[in-house]
Amino acid sequence: MGCKACEVACKQWNQLPDDGFHFTGMSYDQTAHLGASTWRHVAFVERPVPLQGQTSGAGDFSWLMMSDVCKHCQRAGCLEACPTGAIVRTEFDTVYVQPDVCNGCGYCVSACPFGVIDRREDDGRAWKCTLCYDRIGDDQTPACAKACPTASIQYGDLDELHARAESRVRDLHDRGMTDAYLYGKDAENQPGTGGLNAFFLLLDRPEVYNLPPDPVVPTKKALRSWASVAMGAVGMVAVALGAVAFGREGRG
């Protein structure tokens, strides 16, 4: 419902600095995007169409809201790109940045297909959501999910969450909201990342929520890239040999 309790709880628990209190002019969204000091971002998406299956006094207008966060991908581009081992996969299958190991190279920033991870201006190190690693290690719920008054954010065993989310989608379809679907639920749904440990129930195309429609970690394209390099090298050698051979014929 856009209350932003998750944003506040995240900043309070993780002692994150403010973002400057700037007025963005983007509806009620004053955070604008995820960043080094913003690990939760509640997006307000204004659309000139009514919400499917509902009638309201707003007419041809509706809001879509999404609490965005690090996806903790099954195949994490940031982790694969990190040269120092600062980014690790924890025992809870989350992706965690060790700030005492990070050297601020920024490779992880360009490797994330979602634009989640970022570097702080003051120290240059990379930061992102930890899924409250300290809390879940103490058998507590992450701060964002704990503070959410509508249970929009839910935390638990991934298989249980999958079943719960699929049931929710079926319920919405029965109520006429047939546009509802799950984004990034598993590898079949999103092969480019192997599936997301933080997945979403959406009511419109991913681009409307500022999410990539087909995210792919860069390393999945590595084989194709090296094959292209090899083909290019073979082509250059062939051209060079041809030039030498034809040059000799011309002199003869």
Image (spheres, rainbow, N blue to C red):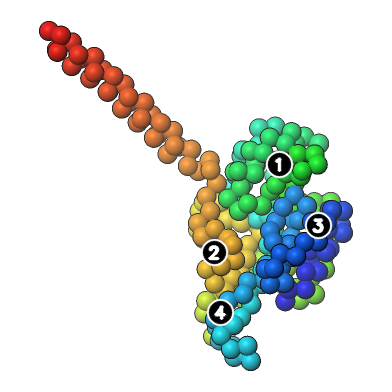
Tell me whether the residue at label 4 lies in contact with that at label 2, contact meaning CB atoms closer than 8 angstroms.
no
Q: Residue 82: horizontal and vertical position, in percent?
A: 66, 37
Q: CA distance from mark 1 to mark 3?
A: 30 Å
Which residue, given by chain and number where applicable, does mark 4 sit on? 48
Mark before the other along the chain sequence, 3 or 4: 3
Residue that appears at 68% across and 58% down: 33
Q: Amino acid at mark 1?
A: Val
Residue 136 sits above or below residue 219 on the image: below
**Judging from the image, what secondary structure is the residue with disc 2 in?**
helix
Q: Residue at x 52, y 76 (%)?
A: 179
In the rendered structure, the answer to whether residue 249 lies left or right of residue 146 reads left
When the figure is inspected, residue 200 is found, relative to residue 63, above or below; the finding is above
**Which residue is identified by label 2?**
207
Query: Disc 3 marks which residue?
Result: 20
Viewer-nearest of labels 2 and 1? 2
What's the amino acid at mark 4?
Answer: Pro
Q: Which residue is mark 1?
A: 88
Q: Which of pointers 2 and 1 lies earlier in the amino acid sequence? A: 1
On the question of residue 136 being in view, the answer is no
Q: Position of residue 120 (x, y in %)?
A: 76, 44
Looking at the image, tell me whether mark 1 or mark 3 is earlier in sequence order: 3
- Distance between the Cα atoms at labels 2 and 1? 29 Å
Q: Could you tell me which quadrant the N terminus lies in?
A: bottom right
Camera-near label (1 vs 3) is 3
Q: Residue lying furthest left in this view?
A: 252
Q: Look at discs 3 and 2 and give the one toward the viewer.
A: 3
* Mark 2 nearby-residue class (10 Å; few <14, some 14–19, many ≥20): few
Q: Residues at badges 1 and 4 in contact (C-beta under 8 Å)?
A: no
| Whole-number angstrom distance, CA of label 3 to CA of label 4 | 30 Å
Q: Find numbered disc 3 in the image and state the secondary structure of the residue it sits on.
A: loop
